[in-house]
Image (cartoon, helix red, strand yellow):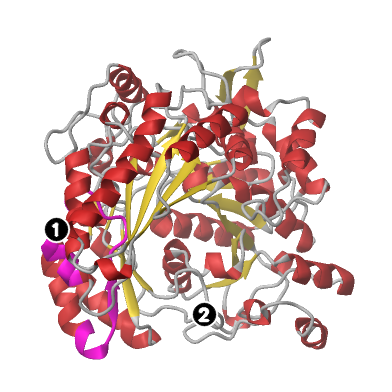
């Protein structure tokens, strides 16, 4: 196969995506391990290698002496053509061995539009993508990641899903595969046993029942499977595995730097944000732990930039102490520090001065909505005064590039709310004119909007998504009200958001639409190069389904959801209460001000909260 690879790599873009051999990759003697794991990321090398979760789990699995975890990424179209032409099966980077020969094929699912790439990668590996057609014990195919909070659209293709954080649960599941191999279990026995591991959902052990109106009536477990599967969390992050060494990619990637995770979860409770609810409760790393890891990762990789990662970086307690400690080490070495996910309500001159000590980059704030009324509806807890004050601080400090992110189609949104985005952008521009320390450089303000996608396990999981034509009407309304040449307006495709919403809130029947898309050539659908809206519409239609049934239909408050079998710790009754608070325009304080009893803290005590 090596000779074939050498021949085809000269014919593809970015061959370094497919060669492996990176500095700090982990190579073992395959004859000395009992279990081989292919960690598959259903997107390109540049995206996957930027994923912190991949780096953590890759290291955690490889820390087990009897296991060898290797990486595999979705090939770009040119490489896929060559693989098919030369009949080369999809292979792992470390060994070059076909992933179909591995004991376990594990996928990271962080985004619904990656689903078709899962099917395509399995096909390229020569592995049946339908779980029912994989009769032998191995390869076991499973997935984890944020999208698994509703695993039903992928139920026909996965042997099991790991819900929540995988540092411990993945290892437990892999050890069970190892035991099953040694003891000669068949597939059904393994699936029954793996379903007993806390945090593991086995789709084939649940039977869906649908009503005449097409809605889900029940998802009934059998063979001892639990009625609800509770996600796994790591209570003490400092005690869990975190890499000391980062794989240095062979080619430029999206986030070409060291990424340092500050904490998991979020105290804010924005009602649209799935991650904010899915990763509760908040747990943080210690400052000394972070400083030690940062130095090890930078020294072992040669990177010249480090970024602090979390859902809301500026909410990290002790951020000043941490940035001071990092800069004391980074400044003499000309290593820059970046702080994404900053909040507009706690951005300070002190923080700004720390950020720009080595290298100054653009700033990004996400008000999400233009009017205070709508920000209260979504519980954003950011006022116009706070945003403009943060902009003033940035402009006084010399920044002249600012990005503002908003959503269109939020629940209760009116035309006045849409126009308020343009008015707010103009106020930001006026703030620059008043306070900029260097007006000669000019200013670039970018306003970006995306189409609101109602997500499972959020207070807005009952909402209807606006139609694509209505979204575009609101885009035109906003565009017509942005008149300054200093303000650039970008908007995201509503067609992608419609399909994302349908997959996000879909049930098991959506799997047939995924098969149809794949059969028609669908893969890498998160890329505009490959996404084909008409192909998706045909695929749903041929499956006897309509995307709008899942995306554009307001759900009844007593409706059974496909994801009700998944327990993330946050009570459904709490989410419903938050929905009612949204329509009343009332804000909910963040977790630091008052515990509102969502239920997630009960996970820390090792027990489930009652409804």
Name the quadrant of the C terminus: top left
The residue drawn where x is 77% and y is 87% is: 6
The verdict on residue 343 being magenta is yes
The verdict on residue 83 being magenta is no
Q: Position of residue 190 (x, y in %)?
A: 61, 48
Above/below status of 53 relative to 537: below
Q: Position of residue 232 (x, y in %)?
A: 38, 46
The residue that label 2 is drawn on is 249
The residue drawn where x is 65% and y is 64% is: 103
The residue drawn where x is 38% and y is 83% is: 303
Instruction: Count numbered badges in the picture.
Output: 2
Kindly tell me whether residue 152 is visible in this rendering: yes
The span shown in magenta is: 330-354
The residue drawn where x is 63% and y is 82% is: 16
Q: Position of residue 580 (x, y in %)?
A: 32, 17
Q: In whole angstroms, how far apart are the C-alphas of marks 1 and 2?
A: 34 Å
Secondary element under disc 2, as helix, strand or loop, is loop
Quarter of image, res 294: bottom left
Quarter of image, res 588: top left
Residue 348: image tag: 1
Name the quadrant of the N terminus: bottom right
Q: Nearer the viewer, residue 480 or 280?
A: 480
Residue 521: image tag: none
């Amino acid at each position: 196969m090596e000779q074939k690879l050498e021949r085809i790599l000269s014919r593809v873009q970015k061959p370094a995506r497919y060669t492996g051999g990176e500095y700090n990759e982990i190579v073992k003697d395959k004859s000395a391990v009992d279990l081989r794991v292919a960690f598959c990321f259903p997107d390109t090398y540049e995206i996957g290698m930027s994923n912190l979760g991949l780096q953590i789990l890759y290291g955690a699995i490889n820390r087990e002496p009897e296991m060898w975890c290797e990486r595999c990424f979705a090939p770009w179209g040119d490489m896929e053509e060559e693989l098919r032409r030369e009949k080369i099966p999809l292979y792992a980077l470390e060994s070059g061995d076909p992933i179909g020969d591995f004991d376990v094929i594990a996928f990271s699912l962080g985004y619904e539009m990656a689903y078709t790439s899962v099917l395509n990668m399995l096909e390229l590996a020569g592995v049946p993508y339908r779980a029912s057609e994989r009769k032998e014990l191995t390869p076991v195919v499973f997935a984890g990641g944020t999208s698994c909070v509703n695993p039903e659209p992928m139920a026909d293709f996965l042997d099991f899903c790991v819900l929540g954080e995988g540092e411990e649960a993945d290892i437990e599941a892999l050890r069970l595969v190892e035991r099953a191999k040694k003891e000669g279990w068949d597939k059904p026995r393994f699936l029954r046993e793996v379903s007993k591991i806390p945090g593991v959902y086995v789709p084939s052990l649940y039977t869906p029942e649908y009503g005449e109106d097409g809605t889900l009536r029940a998802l009934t477990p059998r063979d001892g499977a639990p009625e609800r599967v509770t996600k796994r969390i790591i209570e003490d992050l400092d005690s869990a595995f975190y890499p000391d060494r980062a794989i240095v990619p062979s080619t430029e990637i999206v986030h070409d730097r060291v990424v340092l995770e500050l904490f998991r979860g979020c105290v804010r409770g924005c009602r649209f944000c799935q991650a904010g609810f899915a990763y509760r409760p908040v747990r943080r790393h210690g400052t000394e732990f972070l400083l030690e890891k940062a130095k090890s990762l930078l020294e072992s990789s040669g990177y010249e930039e480090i970024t602090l990662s979390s859902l809301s970086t500026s909410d990290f307690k002790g951020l000043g102490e941490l940035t001071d400690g990092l800069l004391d080490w980074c400044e003499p070495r000309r290593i820059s520090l970046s702080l994404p996910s900053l909040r507009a309500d706690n951005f300070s001159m002190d923080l700004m001065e720390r950020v720009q000590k080595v290298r100054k980059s653009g700033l990004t704030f996400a008000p999400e909505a233009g009017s205070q009324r709508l920000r209260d509806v979504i519980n954003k807890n950011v006022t116009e005064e706070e945003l403009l004050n943060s902009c003033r601080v940035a402009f006084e400090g010399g920044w002249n590039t600012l990005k503002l992110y908003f959503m269109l189609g939020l629940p209760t949104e009116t035309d006045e709310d849409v126009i308020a985005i343009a008015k707010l952008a103009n106020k930001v521009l006026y703030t620059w004119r008043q306070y900029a320390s260097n007006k000669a450089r000019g200013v670039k303000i970018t306003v970006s909007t995306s189409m609101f996608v109602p997500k499972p396990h959020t207070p807005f999981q009952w909402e209807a998504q606006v139609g694509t034509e209505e979204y575009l009407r609101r885009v035109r309304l906003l565009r017509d009200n942005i008149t300054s040449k200093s303000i650039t307006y970008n908007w995201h495709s509503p067609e992608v958001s419609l399909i994302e919403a349908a997959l996000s809130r879909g049930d098991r029947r959506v799997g047939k639409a995924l098969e149809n898309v794949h059969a028609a050539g669908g893969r890498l659908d998160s890329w505009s190069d490959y996404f084909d809206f008409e192909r998706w519409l045909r695929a749903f239609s041929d499956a006897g389904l309509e995307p709008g049934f899942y995306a554009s239909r307001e759900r009844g408050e007593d409706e059974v959801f496909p994801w009700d079998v998944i327990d993330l710790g946050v009570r459904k009754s709490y989410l419903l209460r938050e929905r009612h608070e949204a329509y009343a325009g009332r804000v909910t304080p963040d977790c630091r001000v008052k515990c509102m009893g969502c239920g997630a803290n009960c996970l820390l005590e090792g027990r489930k909260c009652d409804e």
